[in-house]
Image (spheres, helix red, strand yellow):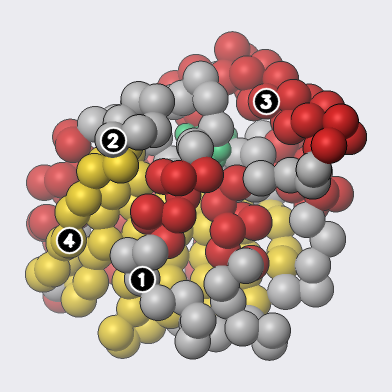
């Protein structure tokens, strides 16, 4: 996820320490001890075609491991809005991944619509811990995802438990699933398409 050699390793460790500190301060919002493995990020992003996406949203940027993966797949003129509520993590991602396509927004994913100028998102990538977040936040984010998704768009979700599945099925007509077994812990990956009327709420 970072540069090579000693500098890259130091940078990686610093980011992991920042993540751990955030986890200790707000365990239910962070919901994981380690950032997602690069393998699981790749497995999740492989579930959608990002090469033609014009606008992508990321929910829960954390240390930027998905952010970097998304930037590696979207076109040169696409836009990525990455939401992260922890100011320390948000500024670290912004500093590390300087890219004109990226805007890191230190605000809750629930408020994403306010930053979209009426546009829709072709792909939404979420690693928010839906099982430990308050149900109101989970429902708010999933309903918003249904509202702002462009026709033919995909919502990608990574979780460490399958508990979110009924909430996804209630809102989307099509939910594809796979497991990324080598992540620690194993990750449950979902690709959600075709929001039902009213987003299931
Ligand atoms: C499981 S961590 C995943 C982080 C990162 N994507 C990774 O795997 O390294 C979830 C992240 O979501 C952030 N978060 C929690 N609630 C949020 C919300 N409502 N809006 C945006 N980010 C949120 C947390 O601060 C945390 O960084």
As rendered, which of 101 and 4 lies closer to the eye?
4
Q: Quadrant of the C terminus?
A: bottom left
Return the disc, 1 or 2, that comes first in the chain's sequence. 1
Q: What residue is shown at x 15% (from left), y 45% (from top)?
A: 165
**Mark 2 sits near ligand 1, with its Cβ under 8 Å away:** no
N-terminal of the pair, mark 3 or mark 4, is: 3
Position of residue 142 measured from the top left corner of the image (x, y, whole percent): 32, 55
Q: Is residue 91 left or right of residue 144?
A: right
For label 3, the residue is 16
Residue depicted at 17% across the width and 34% down the height? 163
- Element type at marker 3? helix
Observer able to see residue 92: yes
**Residue at label 2?**
181
Q: Secondary structure at mark 1?
A: loop
Residue at 79% from the left image edge and 46% from the top image edge: 3
109 sits left or right of 1 in the view: left
Q: CA distance from mark 1 to mark 3?
A: 27 Å
Residue beneath disc 1? 48
* Category of crowding for the residue at label 2, using alpha-carbon neighbours closer than 10 angstroms: few (below 14), some (14–19), many (at least 20): few
Ligand 1 is within 8 Å of the C-beta of the residue at disc 3: no
Mark 1 or 2, which is nearer the eye?
2
Residue 11 visible to the viewer:
no
Q: Mark 3 Cα within 10 Å, few/some/many (few <14, many 20+)?
A: some
| Of marks 4 and 2, the one in the foreground | 2
Residue 51 horizontal side relative to residue 99, left or right:
left
């Amino acid at each position: 996820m970072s540069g090579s050699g000693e500098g890259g390793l130091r940078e990686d460790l610093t980011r992991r320490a920042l993540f751990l500190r955030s986890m200790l301060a707000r365990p239910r919002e962070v919901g994981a001890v380690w950032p997602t493995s690069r393998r699981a990020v790749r497995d999740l992003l492989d579930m959608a075609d990002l090469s033609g996406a014009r606008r992508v949203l990321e929910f829960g940027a954390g240390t930027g491991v998905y952010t970097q993966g998304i930037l590696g797949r979207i076109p040169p003129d696409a836009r990525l809005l990455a939401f992260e509520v922890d100011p320390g993590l948000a500024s670290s991602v912004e500093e590390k991944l300087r890219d004109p396509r990226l805007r890191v927004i230190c605000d809750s994913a629930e408020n994403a619509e306010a930053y979209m100028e009426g546009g829709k998102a072709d792909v939404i990538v979420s690693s928010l811990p839906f099982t430990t977040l308050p149900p109101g936040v989970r429902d708010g984010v999933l309903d918003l995802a249904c509202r702002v998704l462009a026709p033919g768009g995909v919502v990608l979700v990574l979780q460490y438990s399958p508990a979110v599945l009924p909430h996804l099925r209630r809102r989307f007509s099509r939910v594809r699933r796979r497991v990324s077994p080598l992540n620690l812990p194993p990750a449950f990956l979902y690709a959600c398409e075709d929001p039902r009327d009213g987003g299931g709420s």
